Structure formats: C-alpha cells, structure tokens
Image (cartoon, rainbow, N blue to C red):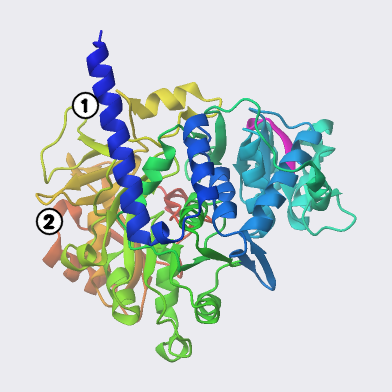
Amino acid sequence: MRSPFTVVRELVSDAREKVFTAARFSHQTGYLWEVRPGAVGELVRALVTGAQNPATAYRIAAKNHPDKVALVHGERRIPFGDLDRLIDSAAHGLHAAGVRRGHSVLLAMKNCPEFVIASAAAGRLRASAVAVSWRSTPRELAYLANHSKARLVVCDPDVFRTLEAARADLSEELLSRIFVVGGAGQGAPFERLLSHEDRGPFVDAAPGEDAAVVIYTSGTTGKPKGAVRKFPRSAANAAFRFLCEVPLRVEDVHLVACPMYHSTAYAFMTFSHIVGNTVVLMDEFTPEGFLAQVERYKVSTTAVVPTMLHRLMQLPEAVRRRYDAHTLRIVFSGGAHLPPTVATAFMDAFGDTVYNFYGATETGLVTLASPRDLRSAPGTIGRAVPGNEIRLLGESGAPVPAGQVGELFVKNDLLVSGYYDDDAATRGSMREGFFSVGDLARVDDHGRYFLEGRKRDMIVTGGVNVYPAEVEHALMGHPGVSEVAVLGRKDEEWGERVVAFVVPAGDVTEGELVAFAKERLSGPKRPKEYHFVPALPRNPTGKVVKRELEGRLEPRTA
C-alpha cells in the first residue's frame, strides 16, 4: 500500500505536468493572448467536474470568441456562440425524445454542421454518439443500429431510405425516433430537436466519465467492432500534449476532407476547435475540389488519408497549378500506410507540410513524424507522442530489440475502454494495460517507428517471416508502379507464397518487376506472382481490403 506522502507527491507531480503542458500549448498556439475570463471559468469547471468530452470545447470556445466562425459548410457560417446554443438545444431535444445518460445515438450522414451538433449534444447528455458510414447497406446499418443498442438516429435522406429498406430488422421504437437532416416529409425533421432553445444551457446533473463516443472499426475482417472511448479527467491534457507537438496556430483554418464518421476527421476537427480555428466542411473529397476549397478559404491545415494524397498527385501538374495552395502549412496523414514516394512527391509539389501520424480508433494518436523525419527516414511513422508508452512484443510476449519486428502495444490516457458488448475481443487485444490492434512495427536507434504490416497479414514462406509492408515499399520504388498490395497465398511447397497486386503507373512488365525485386529483396521476400489490376479495393476510409484481393486468387497446390 502506498504511503500518503507518495500519493500526495504523485498528485503534485501530475498537477505540475498538466499546468506546464497547458501553458506550453497556450503560448505555442497563440491561445494565451486571446483567452477571456469566461473561458477560463468554463475550463476550471470542466477540470473540477471531469467534463472533458469534446462538447466541453464548444462551451469554452463560445465564451472565448462567440462571434468567430466555427463552421463553414457551403454558404452556411456558424459562429462559436451560435454553435454552442444549437448544441444545448439539441441536447434538450434528445433528452425530450428519451435519450439518457449511457444511451446510444446513431449518426449516419455526410459531412454537415448537424453531425457536429448532434454528436456534441449527445456528449452533453453523457450519451454515446455512434458515428457510422452513410454508405452502409441496409443489412450493415441494421447490424450497427442493433449492436450499438441505438435509441435514436440522426441521418440524411439517403440513409433514411436505407433504414426504410432495413425496417424489418429494426425495432418500432427506433423507427419512431429517426430525425432527418434536410429531408422534407421523411421521418421527423432534425429541426424538431432544436426547438428547445428557450431552455438555455444544458447542464448534466451527474457529471462523470461515461462513454461519449463509440466508433465502429472498419471491419476489413469480419463484423466491425464498436470501440468505446471515454473521456477521463486526463483527456484535456492528452490533447494538449499532442497539440504541443505540431505548429497549430489560433488563426488557422482547417479543412475537413475525410468523412466525419472516420475518427481522423472528427479528431482533427476537435483539435482545431480546441485551438479556436475556423473549420470548413467538405461534402465529399475530390482532388480538384480539395484544392478549390484550399484556395477559396485560405486553408492552412487539414487531415487526410494517404489515398487522398495519392489522388492529388495523380492530377496533371497543369491542373494543380490552377489553384493557389500556398496557405497550406500542415497536412496530417494517417489511417493507412503512407508510401514514402507519395509523401516525397507531395512535399516536392506543395512544400514540407506532411505530418504522418500513427494511431487507431482504439488507441488515439500514438506517434508523429514531421516533414523532416519523412525526408530523413522515408516510411517512418515517427516518434512516440508524449503520454504514450509503446511496447513491441514478440510471439512469446517478450520485448524485441531495436531493429526487430514486434506487435505494437500502447498505453495512454485515451485508450478505449474496450469493444462494445464484446468482452472476448477486448481481452484478446489487451496485455497488462496495453492495447494492440494487431499492427507490427520496428523501432530504430533514434526512436523512430516503422510499420511492417498487420499480424494477420504476415506471410510465412519456407519458415521465414515476410512483412508485406517491406515488399510494398521496395516495389513502390519502381517508376512504373502506382500502387501495390502484397499478401500470401497457400502453397504446398512453401506454406505460403508472396503475391503482389500492382496498379501500374505506365508500361511495366512482370519481368521488369522480377528483376527490380531481385536487386532489392532477399529470396523469400520476392513475389512469386504478379497480378496487374486497374485499382486496389479500398474501404471508405482508404484502407486496402486484402480479403477481397485474396478472393480473386484461384486455388493452387504448387
């Protein structure tokens, strides 16, 4: 049992670290020179009560700069003060519709202010905002609604029609609580949730650390799992730690280019609003549309998946030059592997703006690579963000030395508490308080981490472990290769053989790739088969769906 002296010393040390981090954040971002007394009061209240979910950021921002534009969507402009009032109105509306602390609210719509309003309103009730893809099929949507035990749905007209097609698999109670954004005559109008403005600020009568967000994983293997993220008292400090690692400023304008049901989009929008930035919402990403938004709104920061960078670089140079993107200072990239060639090409064209991060729905942000890191150590996902403790463990569970590949486990203040209604999956991912999503990585002598693929994707050929990422990195160095995905297929002689699916960038033959690989990869790592395809199958968040590629391979025995 710890002595009282030890406990007090730890509390003092923790408080000192939080104050230092907050002070550094305030000074570095310029927030210090804009903060108002009302915002300080809200921040103190949040720290005392433990109310540190994303909805808190809007309460503070409304006190700090009520007239500054928080959200831009098409011709709509919503200041922080108005946004905070809309969130309160929606919280009262959700409560009137029967949503209570611990309940789930399903959000399924394209990027729009109502997504932000409904998600933050659920947070004020201490209900769980469950964000799912608006692209979901009727069967998928029914599974997500039922598995999350959703009490209410906020969606757009397209998703409403999908829900109608799934009517037989949904409860009458849920079907009676569907609120539609911009869908005249379909379901209940979303505006009905906002008809409670006269009730004033919504105050949670019993603050605490209940689940505020449930995010369903991509589901590239089997059914998606709901990652439950709570927001403990240390949540704000965890956010400040990350913000201290990047050069965000209060005057920045952030562009949301990814779909908001994706954790990357929502996380970086929240970070931007914590700093006090104006956030521009794209309906749906297109390469030229992205550049047009950057020019129109003088965008300085954004967060994308690597596929978006690749598509931007596929635009003819003459098209890219039509748009003025000189204001773009920070491009966060994550959610999937960032090929070094793509990162370098983008920075050569747009300047050293790319910050590659590693994280997962379940872990939050774990590592960060600066443009300098990406130049000096191509392929790196960077160093651990302060507040993260990383372990690389071998099959035996023992740590592996630098340079060797192990399964990446992480512990930090924002780990999910587990998977919703799936204790077995939670237990399988945890080890001594550390969480793994199955990624394999190595670390060099400078503390820089490199992903080597996923544990389930590792290929064992002739008794040798082959990591697909290493083979993909090598093949991406060929000028005739646009994209590549490597996987294993069963083989009687070798156990598995290495197979490469290649999206060509021009005229390239299998013989050329065989010779190219021979110069760069040892025997077991060289693909035994090459398949040329027009595009790689991806899920909505940009990850390659290797399961679909496996389905294209005909069985063979030798």
Amino acid beneath label 2: Ser
Residue with the most extreme top position: 1
Tell me the element at label 1: loop
Residue density around tag 1, few if under 14, some if 14–19, many if 20 or more, within 10 Å: few
What residue is disc 2 on? 522
Left or right for 233, reference 13: right
Magenta stretch: includes residue 325: no
Precedes in sequence: disc 1 or disc 2: 1
Q: Which residues are magenta?
A: 147-153
Q: Looking at the picture, which amino acid does disc 1 mark?
A: Gly
Q: Quadrant of residue 30?
A: bottom left
User: Is residue 160 visible to us here?
Assistant: yes
Residue 68 horizontal/vertical position (percent): 58, 65
Find disc 1 in the rendering and name its residue: 397
In the foreground, 493 or 427: 427
Q: Are marks 1 and 2 in contact (CB under 8 Å)?
A: no
The x, y position of residue 517, in whole percent, is 18, 65
> Which residue shows up at 17% across the image and 70% down it?
515
Q: How many marks?
A: 2
User: In the rendered image, which quarter contains the N terminus?
Assistant: top left
Drawn side of residue 108 relative to residue 14, left or right: right
